[in-house]
Image (cartoon, helix red, strand yellow):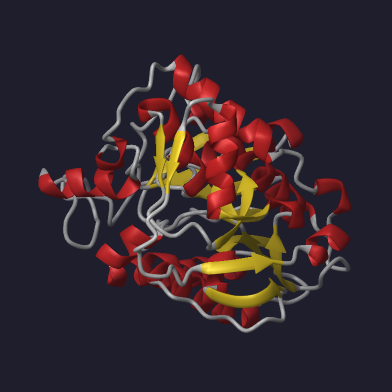
């Protein structure tokens, strides 16, 4: 089996590569990534990409000839990956996350690829209101990132058939340790605040709901989607991916972190305008269709893992929200040095016409 992973050099990708290598030891794993965050390693003992058979560099907006030749499954992780980046680069977000992804899927189908796994998001539920959201619930995307996921699912659906199985994994908010750690995610941010400053400053009133999933459990879900037979979910499946137990209010997450790091103070911004991004999610369908791939990690052990990992690297940066642990800061730095243009394409390479390296 040959598996192509796009966007593998971000936060989620290293764990996915490690897990797929373990589960499919005979598979040929190929990475395809722009390399924006390749240097953002955090305590990795081994370059994550060394577990691949090949790592290719390129832009998903400009796919090289032959990229999909002989590929059996595509795992599409590549995206402008959070709300601040989507707000700053809204048109690029739609181009990369939606238009490029659909073109990749079309080319994959034409090349005879049988399986397409799309990293979607529960953020498409937006202002969720009362009750946990199921796959049949109305979608209410509030950001460019969330809109790009809604548009992608809409345009992927008609491509699916008995020869081209599409799984859209509507992931909860990611958390947990990675070889390329991000701190612009709620649990990761709170642990960093506690470790570096002994104080968690919540930028809202703490009431919004967030469903969460550890990056290791995301990798297990991707394994399931790659292996999912047609009779389990059909040719096209959009599925909430996480567990009901991981629905938390933001203030409860902060309190859990404070308990894991005694002495940590928690402050709320009671005057903050309401955060409309609040939703609880029902993961019953995932529980029914993927009983052997349910999330295994807990909030308690995730917080401990993040705490221990940051302490081991002597993390003490109280100003980390202005550091390269925030993905938008990485892109901004590359823009400031003119290595990326306004469309977030490299200015110093021929990334528009990449060559495949065997």
Answer left or right for 48 relative to 59.
right
Task: Depth check: give the residue in front, 358 or 162.
Answer: 162
Q: Position of residue 142 (x, y in %)?
A: 44, 75
At 83% across and 55% down in the image, what residue appears?
Answer: 290
- On the image, which quarter does residue 82 sit in? bottom left
- On the image, which quarter does residue 296 sit in? top right
Task: Depth check: give the residue in front, 284 or 14.
Answer: 284
**Label tally:** 0
Q: Is residue 264 above or below residue 331?
A: above
> Is residue 220 visible in the rendered structure shown here?
yes
- On the image, which quarter does residue 304 sit in? top right
Residue most extreme to the left: 337
Answer left or right for 272 relative to 276.
left
Q: Is residue 42 above or below residue 108?
A: above
Q: Is residue 276 above or below residue 211?
A: below
At 62% across and 34% down in the image, what residue appears?
Answer: 302
Q: Quadrant of the N terminus?
A: top right
At 52% across and 80% down in the image, what residue appears?
Answer: 140
Q: Position of residue 354 (x, y in %)?
A: 33, 50
Q: Position of residue 141 (x, y in %)?
A: 48, 77
């Amino acid at each position: 089996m040959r598996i192509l992973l796009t966007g593998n050099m971000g936060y989620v990708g290293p764990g996915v590569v490690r897990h797929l290598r373990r589960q499919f030891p005979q598979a040929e794993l190929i990475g395809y990534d722009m390399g924006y965050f390749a240097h953002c390693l955090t305590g990795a003992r081994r370059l994550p990409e060394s577990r691949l058979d090949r790592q290719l560099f390129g832009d998903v907006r400009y796919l090289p000839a032959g990229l999909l030749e002989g590929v059996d499954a595509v795992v599409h992780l590549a995206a402008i990956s959070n709300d601040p980046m989507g707000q700053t680069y809204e048109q690029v977000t739609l181009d990369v996350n939606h238009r490029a992804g659909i073109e990749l899927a079309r080319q994959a189908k034409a090349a005879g690829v049988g399986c397409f796994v799309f990293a979607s998001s529960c953020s498409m539920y937006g202002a969720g209101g009362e009750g946990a959201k199921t796959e049949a619930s109305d979608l209410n995307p509030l950001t460019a990132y969330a809109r790009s996921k809604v548009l992608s699912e809409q345009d992927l659906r008609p491509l699916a058939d008995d020869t081209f199985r599409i799984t859209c994994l509507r992931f909860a908010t990611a958390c947990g340790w990675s070889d390329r750690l991000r701190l612009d995610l709620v649990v990761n941010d709170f642990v960093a605040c506690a470790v570096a400053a002994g104080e968690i400053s919540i930028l809202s009133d703490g009431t919004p709901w967030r469903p969460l999933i550890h990056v290791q459990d995301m990798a297990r879900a991707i394994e399931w989607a790659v292996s999912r037979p047609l009779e389990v979910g059909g040719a096209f499946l959009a599925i909430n991916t996480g567990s009901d137990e991981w629905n938390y209010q933001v203030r409860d997450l902060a309190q859990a972190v404070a308990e894991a790091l005694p002495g940590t103070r928690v402050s709320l911004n009671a005057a903050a305008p309401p955060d409309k991004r609040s939703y609880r999610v029902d993961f019953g369908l995932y529980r029914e269709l993927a009983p052997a791939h349910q999330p295994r990690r807990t909030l308690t052990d995730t917080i401990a893992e993040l705490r221990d990992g940051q302490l081991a690297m002597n993390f003490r940066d109280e100003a980390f929200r202005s550091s390269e642990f925030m993905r938008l800061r990485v892109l901004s730095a590359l823009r400031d040095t003119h290595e990326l243009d306004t469309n977030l394409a490299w200015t110093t390479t021929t990334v528009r016409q990449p060559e495949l390296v065997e």
